[in-house]
């Protein structure tokens, strides 16, 4: 009986640990900021440069064309060649910006990715993308 009690205790402990680790992932998966970042990544993956540019902030759109965005992405191999992404963390800042973080996966392995996202008139825009610490120009 004692072994059964210890086994049940370890099972419960493991369940609490896994549940605790799943909470940030579930929050990230249900965030509109994450949806904006995921949409940008999907557009880049599909080479839909005009759509990807439309997801960027008005400041970025005002200074870049879709062709310039394409050239900028080409400078970040992990972003250009990713096959899928997992966004796992969302943090809301006092100024209203939201940081979304995760990983890109591709032929070269895993690369960390981070987004700064903000809401304007009910729509979420990507203000900044950084892959492996290098920002998208």
Image: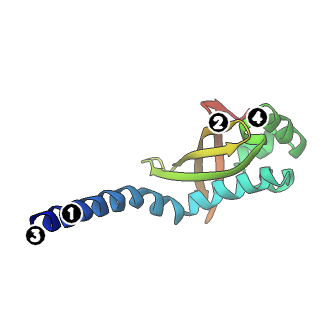
Give the mark, 2 or 3, whose residue is nearer the N terminus.
3
Crowding at mark 2 (Cα within 10 Å: few <14, some 14-19, many 20+): many
Location of mark 4 (residue): 77
Q: Is residue 127 left or right of residue 30?
A: right
Looking at the image, what colour scheme do you see? rainbow
In whole angstroms, how far apart are the C-alphas of marks 1 and 3? Answer: 10 Å
Distance (Cα) linking label 1 and label 4: 47 Å
- Name the element at disc 4: helix
Task: Mark 1 and mark 4 in contact? Answer it, CB < 8 Å.
Answer: no
- Earlier residue among tags 1 and 2: 1
Q: Earlier in the sequence, mark 2 or mark 4?
A: 4
For the C terminus, which image quadrant? top right
Q: Nearer the viewer, residue 42 or 66?
A: 42
**In the image, residue 87 above or below residue 59:** below
Label 3 neighbour load within 10 Å: few <14, some 14-19, many 20+: few
Counting residues from the N terminus, which is met first, the one under dot 3 or under dot 4? 3
Of all residues, the one furthest to the right in this rendering is 67
- Say which label, 1 or 4, has the lower sequence index: 1
Residue pointed to by mark 3: 1
SS for tag 2? strand
* Mark 1: few/some/many CA within 10 Å (<14, 14-19, 20+): few
Disc marking residue 7: 1
- Residue bearing mark 2: 131
Residue 124 image-quadrant placement: bottom right
Alpha carbons under labels 1 and 2: distance apart = 43 Å
Label 2 or label 4, whichever lies nearer to me, is 4
Residue 106 rendering spot, x and y as whole percentages: 71, 43
Contact (CB < 8 A) between labels 2 and 4?
Answer: no
């Amino acid at each position: 009986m004692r072994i059964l009690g210890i086994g049940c205790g370890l099972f419960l402990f493991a369940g609490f640990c896994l549940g605790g680790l799943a909470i940030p992932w579930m929050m990230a998966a249900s965030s509109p900021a994450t949806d904006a970042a995921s949409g940008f990544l999907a557009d880049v993956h599909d080479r839909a440069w005009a759509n990807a540019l439309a997801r960027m902030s008005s400041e970025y759109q005002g200074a870049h064309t879709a062709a310039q965005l394409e050239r900028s992405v080409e400078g970040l191999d992990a972003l250009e060649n990713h096959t899928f992404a997992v966004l796992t963390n969302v943090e809301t800042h006092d100024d209203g910006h939201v940081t979304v973080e995760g990983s890109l996966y591709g032929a070269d392995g895993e690369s960390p990715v981070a987004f700064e996202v903000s809401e304007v008139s009910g729509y979420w825009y990507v203000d900044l993308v950084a892959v492996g610490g290098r920002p998208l120009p």
